[in-house]
Image: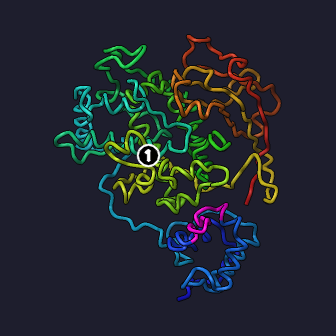
């Protein structure tokens, strides 16, 4: 049998639009045994000549060779320089039939909604469940105390999945654990965890019981005795901090990206101005409890805040047609970001402690498909939707790539900050003539040197993508503001954090 398409050869095919969908699961498994990963863009590009010769000669795939249209489409992609492009628009006709990896969808058993849209009965049920787990004794695994404690305090079992590839899978499992605790309350078996769309004002419902604060039923660590009450900044200040820290801009920028590392940011030298940056600056904007990683989850807003990050991850997955393993792997640059690839392909790296060997018994693999694997979907927010895909911009590009210089925007990178020297979360401020023009935060524990993930990713960088006109005609400077000012004061001395440097790059636009 020959695989046939319903169209003529595609003149300008792209990786995300057509090429990744030309390889069936059977093809992938067959070639994986020979060391060729057909889900990897880099692998397909590096072996494109060999792949072409095999498919053009009718030798591959075995028993189901490609039609001439398919072969010509693949060759056009090679001749055009292997463009990545973007996925086809939702509802567009499938140009190729080898999309067996696309999951069939079933109605979600749990629909998580924007908290501002809950009906009176839905809100009453949520309050009942929330109040009930708060009232449970600290020894109960479904208690608020135990669930919040998974994030760090109380010691010795501490977990940190921030600034690493497992950030989104781990927090997705964490939310399932917390939601299951809510559903363990008799009469609340159908409750779901709503989200706060952080691009909108702080919801009024979260300003009153049982969502406004939490009182510790017992001591959890230094500075947090029994009876300690969680706290936040005044709500007007939270709104201003979210604006100053560019949280909404970072969310929108992240949702316009096509590659995994660009969506998440931070590691593999990816720009730190997308989802992880928005998450960190969001934490630092809400404080004081939310600023401290050890205790952030004890502030009730944490759950609605994090439900939103999971929603954005799922929305990005759907936009990228990356809701199963193959689709997600096609977005990861295996060469530059091998660890991200490995957490989904290497069994030893798929654990999400403590949620793999304990309820809800999830791994990186089982968190990929939120809808079909977990039965969870999200209702669209009431806010303005995030933008579509924007042109791909980089500070650096490979010499074999064509590019344009984006002359009206630049990237200012603060490089080489040794965050292990800074006890707790902090914010980097970019100033012009002594006035702050942009800020970006980093969220971490006070005892940062005891955090294995922090130690493994000690050197941090911060990216400020700005119109060129904003920085021209003035004197620029940078300073670092620690959350815990009692250690060294308002400004953290640069010589104590590794003498960071500043780079300024014009942005290069590819494809």
Image vertical order of residue 459 relative to residue 43, above or below: above
State the residue at coordinates (63%, 81%). 70
| Residue 343 belongs to magenta span | no
Outermost residue toward the left?
A: 186
Q: Is residue 6 above or below residue 240?
A: below
* Magenta stretch, main secondary structure class: loop
The one of 160 and 303 positioned closer to us in this rendering: 160
The question of residue 33 being in magenta is answered with: yes
Q: For residue 435, what is the image quadrant?
A: top right
Dot 1 crowding, Cα within 10 Å, few <14, some 14–19, many 20+:
many
Residue 357 placement (x, y as % from top left): 35, 44
Q: Is residue 348 left or right of residue 421?
A: left
Whole-percent x and y of residue 238?
50, 27
Question: Which residue was labeled with disc 1?
Answer: 351
x then y, percent, for residue 277: 58, 37
Q: Nearer the viewer, residue 495 or 342?
A: 342
Residue 228 versus residue 270 in the image, above or below: above
Foreground of the two, 313 or 250: 313
Identify the magenta region: 31-43
Where does residue 252 sit, x and y in percent of width and height? 58, 46
Query: How many numbered tags mark residues here?
Result: 1
**Image position of 334 (left or right of 380):** right
* Residue 482 figure quarter: top right
Helix, strand or loop for disc 1: loop
Question: Residue at image x 70%, y 79%?
Answer: 53
């Amino acid at each position: 049998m020959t695989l046939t398409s319903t169209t003529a050869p595609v003149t300008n095919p792209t990786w995300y639009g057509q090429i990744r969908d030309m390889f069936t699961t059977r093809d992938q498994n067959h070639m994986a045994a020979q060391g060729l990963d057909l889900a990897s863009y880099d692998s397909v590009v590096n072996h494109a000549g060999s792949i072409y010769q095999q498919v053009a000669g009718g030798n591959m795939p075995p028993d189901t060779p490609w039609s001439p249209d398919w072969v010509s489409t693949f060759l056009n992609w090679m001749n055009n320089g292997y463009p990545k492009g973007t996925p086809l628009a939702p509802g567009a006709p499938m140009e190729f039939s080898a999309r067996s990896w696309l999951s069939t969808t079933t109605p979600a058993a749990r629909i998580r909604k924007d908290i501002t849209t809950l009906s009176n009965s839905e809100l009453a049920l949520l309050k009942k469940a929330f109040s009930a787990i708060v009232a449970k004794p600290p020894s109960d695994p479904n208690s608020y105390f135990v669930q919040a404690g998974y994030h760090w305090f109380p010691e010795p079992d501490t977990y940190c999945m921030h600034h690493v590839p497992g950030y989104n899978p781990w927090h997705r499992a964490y939310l399932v654990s917390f939601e299951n605790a809510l559903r363990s309350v008799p009469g609340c078996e159908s409750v779901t965890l709503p989200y706060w769309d952080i691009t909108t004002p702080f919801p009024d419902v979260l300003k009153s019981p049982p969502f406004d604060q939490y009182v510790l039923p017992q001591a959890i660590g230094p500075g947090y005795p029994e009876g300690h009450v969680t706290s936040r900044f005044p709500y007007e200040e939270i709104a201003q901090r979210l604006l100053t820290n560019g949280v909404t801009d970072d969310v929108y920028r992240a949702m316009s990206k096509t590659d995994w590392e660009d969506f998440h940011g931070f590691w593999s030298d990816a720009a730190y101005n997308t989802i992880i940056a928005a998450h960190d600056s969001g934490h630092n904007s809400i404080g004081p409890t939310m600023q401290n990683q050890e205790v952030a989850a004890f502030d009730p807003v944490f759950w609605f805040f994090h439900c939103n990050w999971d929603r954005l991850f799922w929305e990005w997955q759907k936009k990228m047609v990356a809701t199963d393993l193959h689709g997600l792997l096609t977005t990861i640059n295996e060469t530059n970001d091998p660890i991200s690839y490995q957490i989904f392909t290497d069994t030893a790296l798929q654990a999400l402690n403590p949620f793999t060997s304990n309820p809800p018994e999830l791994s990186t693999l089982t968190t990929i498909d939120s809808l079909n694997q977990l039965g969870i979907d999200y209702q669209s927010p009431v806010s303005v939707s995030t933008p579509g895909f924007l042109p791909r911009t980089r500070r650096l590009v490979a010499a074999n790539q064509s590019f344009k210089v984006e002359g009206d925007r630049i990237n200012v990178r603060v490089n080489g900050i040794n965050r292990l020297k800074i006890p707790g979360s902090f914010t980097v401020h970019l100033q012009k003539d002594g006035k702050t023009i942009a800020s970006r935060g980093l969220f971490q524990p006070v005892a940062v040197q005891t955090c294995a993930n922090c130690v493994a990713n000690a050197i941090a960088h911060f990216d400020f993508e700005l119109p060129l006109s904003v920085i021209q005609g003035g004197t620029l400077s940078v300073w670092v503001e620690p959350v815990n000012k009692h250690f060294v004061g308002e400004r953290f001395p640069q010589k104590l954090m590794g003498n960071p440097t500043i780079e300024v790059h014009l942005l290069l636009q590819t494809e």
